């Protein structure tokens, strides 16, 4: 029996008492992936990206391990909820226009001490001040650096369109605005190099593209390391008490950790290892988060139909944003239908061995987005479910 066949047998045995659709996390794989992130971080603390986990129990599990420290959140409402739940080091990694949330933050010393908000424009400080509703707590602030690679005099841009702050002078100018303004304290700098951390450099069957990606990423790493160090020097000259400089992502942990200017690494997808993280030369993870759909029809030879399946991931639309049939190996979508809203036909010789009620296991394209489809994650150890824990959705929260 191959390792994958053995995994399928384990998952089927562990969930035999559960009707599909069902989602699991293999804790052996999850813990091994956590160990690998720490190894690659080289002693620098890893801040867990909550959007890639979306389950409080698993956030607690990974943060209980030495080497993981703090959460990188994705909305202000989520940040406040996590702080009320006992998490005490939360970096909101995206700007917010949640006026009610800012009023709560500014009125509660516990929340204000636990949550750091992100800004990249003085107008965001104005919005926070206008939202205080009498709250006098000091708001902790982090600045975001644009990490994109600019080529040909800026005519070509590689990287996400995030912060407008690019140069040391621009970051220092906003830092002075924060420092001069009552009610705010500048505590950090964040820079997410998505074109390095989130783009695979070893795409199967595309050697030329993969080589081009590797060359781009090597150039981007060199440029960003130099610019990030200059930015940190400029901001520390304004705010000597800066507490952290956050960088990285699952695909670039060891490279970002090697920069002296960076004090902590952000990562989250590397815990679940969704399909978009298969194509990297820098690391190999173990798929930990899976979902199963039940076979409900056998339309003909080499075809089965499963219930549900239309769970595309965010990002530019394309085949790589679709879940992938994983176990048993050898199944594929019907190109005329793809994964459907209510049913999904699957083609391939393994279909002939599947019976009505059997499970087909899938991997989502991205990590935490799987949890927007399921109320609970069943935690598997060996061939048993040892716990069932709610996702954010299962606790009644869909923050985005």
Image (cartoon, rainbow, N blue to C red):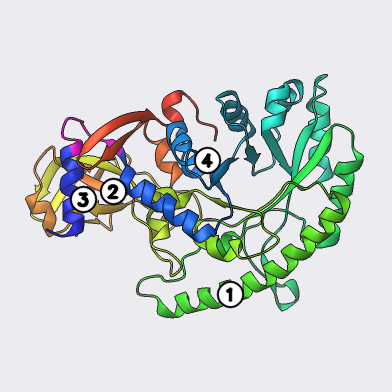
Report, in whole angstroms, how far the alpha carbon at label 2 lies from the one at label 1: 33 Å
Q: Which of marks 3 and 2 is in front?
A: 3
Residue where numbered disc 3 is placed: 7
Range shown magenta: 14-23
81 over 3 or under it: above or below: above
Secondary structure at badge 1 equals: helix
Measured as percent of width and height from the top left, residue 327 is found at 21, 52
Instruction: Please tell me how crowded label 1 is: few (under 14), some (14-19), or many (20+) other residues with Cα within 10 Å.
Output: few
Marks 2 & 1, CB-CB < 8 Å contact: no
Circle number at residue 50: 4
Relative to 256, 107 lies left or right: right
Report, in whole angstroms, how far the alpha carbon at label 4 lies from the one at label 1: 28 Å
Measured as percent of width and height from the top left, residue 360 is found at 21, 46
Q: Residue at x 54, y 32 (%)?
A: 399
**Mark 4 or mark 2, which is nearer the start of the sequence?**
4
Q: Residue at x 43, y 50 (%)?
A: 34
Report, in whole angstroms, how far the alpha carbon at label 3 lies from the one at label 2: 13 Å
Relative to 3, 190 lies left or right: right
Residue where numbered disc 2 is placed: 362
Measured as percent of width and height from the top left, residue 353 is found at 7, 51
The answer to whether residue 111 is seen in the rendering is: yes
Relative to 177, 131 lies left or right: left
**Mark 1 or mark 2, which is nearer the start of the sequence?**
1
Q: In which quarter of the image is the C terminus?
A: top right
Circle number at residue 218: 1
């Amino acid at each position: 029996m191959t390792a994958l066949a053995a995994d399928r047998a384990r998952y089927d045995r562990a969930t035999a008492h559960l009707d599909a659709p069902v989602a699991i996390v293999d804790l052996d794989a999850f813990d091994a992936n956590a160990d690998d992130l720490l190894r690659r971080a080289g002693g620098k603390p890893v801040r867990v990206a909550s959007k890639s986990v979306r389950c409080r129990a698993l956030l607690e599990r990974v943060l209980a391990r030495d080497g993981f420290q703090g959460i990188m959140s994705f909305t202000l409402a989520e940040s406040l909820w996590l702080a009320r739940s006992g998490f005490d080091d939360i970096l909101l990694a995206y700007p917010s226009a949640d006026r009610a949330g800012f009023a709560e933050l500014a009125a509660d010393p516990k929340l204000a001490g636990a949550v750091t908000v992100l800004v990249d424009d003085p107008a965001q400080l104005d919005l926070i001040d206008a939202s205080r509703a009498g709250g006098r707590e000091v708001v902790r602030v982090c600045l975001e650096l644009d990490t994109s690679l600019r080529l040909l005099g800026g005519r070509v841009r590689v990287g996400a369109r995030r912060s407008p702050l690019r140069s040391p002078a621009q970051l220092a100018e906003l830092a002075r605005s924060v420092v001069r303004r009552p009610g705010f304290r500048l505590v950090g700098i964040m820079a997410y190099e998505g074109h390095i951390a989130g783009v695979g450099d070893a795409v199967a069957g595309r050697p030329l593209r993969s080589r081009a990606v590797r060359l781009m990423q090597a150039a981007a790493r060199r440029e960003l390391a130099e610019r990030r160090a200059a930015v940190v020097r400029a901001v520390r000259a304004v705010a000597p008490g800066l507490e952290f400089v956050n960088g990285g992502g699952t695909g670039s942990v060891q490279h970002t950790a090697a920069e002296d200017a960076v004090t902590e690494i952000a990562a989250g997808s590397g815990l679940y290892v969704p399909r978009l993280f298969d194509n990297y030369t820098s690391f190999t993870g173990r798929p930990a988060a899976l979902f199963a759909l039940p076979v409900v029809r056998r339309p003909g030879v080499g075809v089965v139909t499963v219930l549900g399946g239309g769970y595309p991931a965010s990002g530019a639309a394309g085949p790589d944003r679709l879940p992938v049939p994983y176990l048993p190996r050898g199944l594929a979508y019907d190109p005329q239908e793809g994964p459907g809203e209510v049913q999904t036909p699957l083609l391939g010789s393994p279909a002939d061995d599947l019976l009505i009620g059997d499970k087909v296991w899938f991997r989502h394209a991205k990590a935490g987005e799987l949890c927007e489809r399921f109320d609970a994650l069943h935690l598997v150890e060996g061939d048993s479910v040892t716990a069932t824990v709610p996702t954010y959705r299962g606790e009644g929260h869909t923050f985005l």
